[in-house]
Image (cartoon, helix red, strand yellow):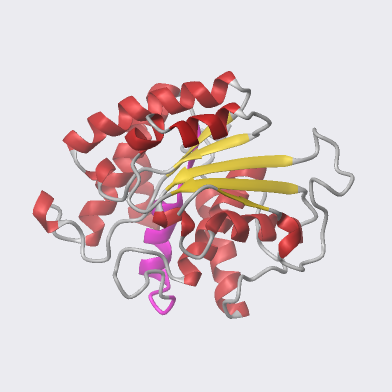
Amino acid sequence: MARFARSLARAAARLAACACLVVSVGCSGTAGPTCGAGAGAEACTRVLFLGNSYTSVNDLPSTFAQLARSAGRPVEVAMVANGGETLAQHAASAESLDKIASGGWTYVVLQEQSETPATAAGRDEMYAAARTLAGKAQAVGAVPLLFMTWAHEDGLPASGLPTYEAMQQQIDAGYLGIANELKVPVAPVGFTWYVVHHDHPEIGLWSDDGSHPSVAGTYLAACVFYAAIFRQSPEGLSFHGGIPDEQASVLQAEASDNVLNLQSQWGLR
């Protein structure tokens, strides 16, 4: 598995890379500061997630916020994430553009529809939209952060990607290609998902449809975002998102290893 991770990192290096919901981190009951509880503007991290059901299922933004809050970090999150929404649709959406323009964001997360980055035709559409949205984010002082997603459990046979592994490699290449062009960072959720799936198959990351995340899959994504945004390991954090403690510890460690040990690969330094 380590050999695969290294080879995938080298390959990436060759490339060289629901409705609008505002979530208050005060709603979980987990102890910790919120942005509205005396935190200064500089101390508060505000993250806008633009995506679709991969973001909204199990409420990834809230899961991330509660995880960060358990580390004592003041966080505010929001999302625009309608089912099946593509970045091209976000780039043409008054709702999404107005949300970006409202300002105050530290990061604007860009999550493409699950199949789009895996094909050449899909990438053309994705890249044009990512350029637009990244520019809008940067115009209000935010850092665009690409959300590298996971592949379908059974791949994408109709597009010549008959296995999960084949589809994941193409998704990774798709995200890293535009990240390299735009010089923006990546949250490598899909890359880390691959490692966990192969090293810890007892942890079910997909829901029954083989596409959307299970609760554990969403928790893994939150851990990756924590490591990518704060450049700090989520290991030992007390918020476990409703999954068994042992599984949470594994996912925290894998997020730490696959984000922080490859920071330059993901544009995080």
Number of numbered tags placed on the structure image: 0
Front-lying residue, 115 or 48? 48
Q: Position of residue 24 (x, y in %)?
A: 70, 54
Front-lying residue, 178 or 112? 112
When the figure is inspected, residue 64 is found, relative to residue 197, above or below; the finding is above
On the picture, is 110 further left or further right than 167? right
Residue 194 visible? The answer is yes
- Residue farthest toward the right in the current orientation of the protein: 38
Q: Position of residue 48 (x, y in %)?
A: 57, 41
Q: Based on the displayed image, in which of its 4 quarters is residue 192 positioned?
A: bottom left
Can residue 196 be found in the magenta stretch? yes
Q: Based on the displayed image, in which of its 4 quarters is residue 32 positioned?
A: bottom right
Task: Tell me where the magenta segment starts and ends, as one range.
Answer: 185-203
Q: Position of residue 208 (x, y in %)?
A: 32, 75
Going 59% across and 79% down the picture, which residue do you hit?
Answer: 246
Front-lying residue, 212 or 258? 212
When the figure is inspected, residue 228 is found, relative to residue 167, above or below; the finding is above
| Quarter placement of the N terminus | bottom left
Residue 17 visible? The answer is no
Going 64% across and 71% down the picture, which residue do you hit?
Answer: 240
Going 17% across and 34% down the picture, which residue do you hit?
Answer: 121
Q: Based on the displayed image, in which of its 4 quarters is residue 182 positioned?
A: top left
On the picture, is 192 further left or further right than 169? right
Going 60% across and 76% down the picture, which residue do you hit?
Answer: 242
